[in-house]
């Protein structure tokens, strides 16, 4: 009879454990990608045999295995015929392509300028594209539109919904 009480007591204990105690939850933490290094207030120079090719400034940057992320990016490409400078609130430099975000100002050394909020610049092809509204100007000439594609090497511009104001000068004979 004592053995029966033992098994009943043991069975009740197991049932209490089963229903009263919850299994321990193990939390899994997903780690974010960790940068290889971070720097503040920097200037990066890229040189080749001809001289300065790329100049990049920023207030803060992080180097990951495949890209740089930069705050307050100031990027200058001097590898093509015309030097082009781009400033933005932030940017990502990956595989010679610069993704710019926020208050972008693109200025080419001959005076061509455009402003937008989001753009991509491919250093290999020297093509700048802007998704969304933009304002492009040179001197008194002004163009507004959507979806700009500007080829710096060929000086060719493509866009949608264009509104242009041009000032023509008469030639004096």
Image: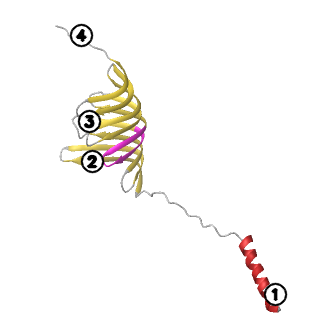
Which portion, as a residue range, is magenta?
A: 88-101
The outermost residue toward the left is 173
Residue position marked by numbered label 3 in the rendering: 83
Callout 3–callout 4 Cβ contact below 8 Å = no
Residue position marked by numbered label 1 in the rendering: 5
Locate the C terminus and report the quarter of the image it occupies. Answer: top left
Left or right: residue 171 versus residue 115 is left
Q: Residue 132 appears at what percent x and percent y?
A: 42, 32
Measured Cα–Cα span from mark 1 to mark 2: 84 Å
Q: Residue at x 26, y 35 (%)?
A: 83
Q: Quadrant of residue 6?
A: bottom right
* Mark found first going from the N terminus, 1 or 2: 1
Left or right: residue 162 versus residue 7 is left
Tag 3, which secondary structure?
Answer: loop
Res 170 label = 4
Asked if residue 34 is positioned above or below residue 161 in the image, the reply reads below
Measured Cα–Cα span from mark 2 to mark 3: 14 Å
* Mark found first going from the N terminus, 3 or 4: 3
Measured Cα–Cα span from mark 3 to mark 4: 30 Å
Q: Residues within 10 Å of mark 3 (few under 14, many from 20)?
A: some
């Amino acid at each position: 009879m004592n053995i029966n009480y033992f098994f009943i007591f043991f069975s009740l204990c197991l049932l209490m454990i089963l229903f009263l105690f919850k299994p321990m939850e193990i939390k899994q933490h997903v780690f974010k990608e960790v940068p290889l290094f971070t720097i503040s207030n920097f200037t990066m120079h890229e040189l080749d045999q001809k001289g300065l090719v790329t100049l990049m400034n920023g207030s803060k940057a992080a180097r990951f295995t495949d890209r740089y992320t930069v705050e307050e990016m100031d990027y200058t490409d001097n590898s093509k015929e015309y030097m082009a400078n781009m400033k933005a609130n932030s940017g990502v430099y990956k595989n010679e392509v610069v993704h710019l975000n926020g208050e972008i100002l693109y200025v080419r050394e001959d005076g061509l300028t455009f402003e937008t909020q989001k753009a991509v610049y491919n250093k290999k092809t020297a093509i700048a594209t802007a998704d969304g509204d933009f304002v492009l100007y040179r001197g008194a000439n002004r163009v507004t539109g959507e979806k700009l594609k500007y080829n710096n090497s060929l000086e060719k511009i493509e866009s949608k919904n264009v509104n242009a104001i041009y000032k023509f000068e008469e030639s004096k004979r």
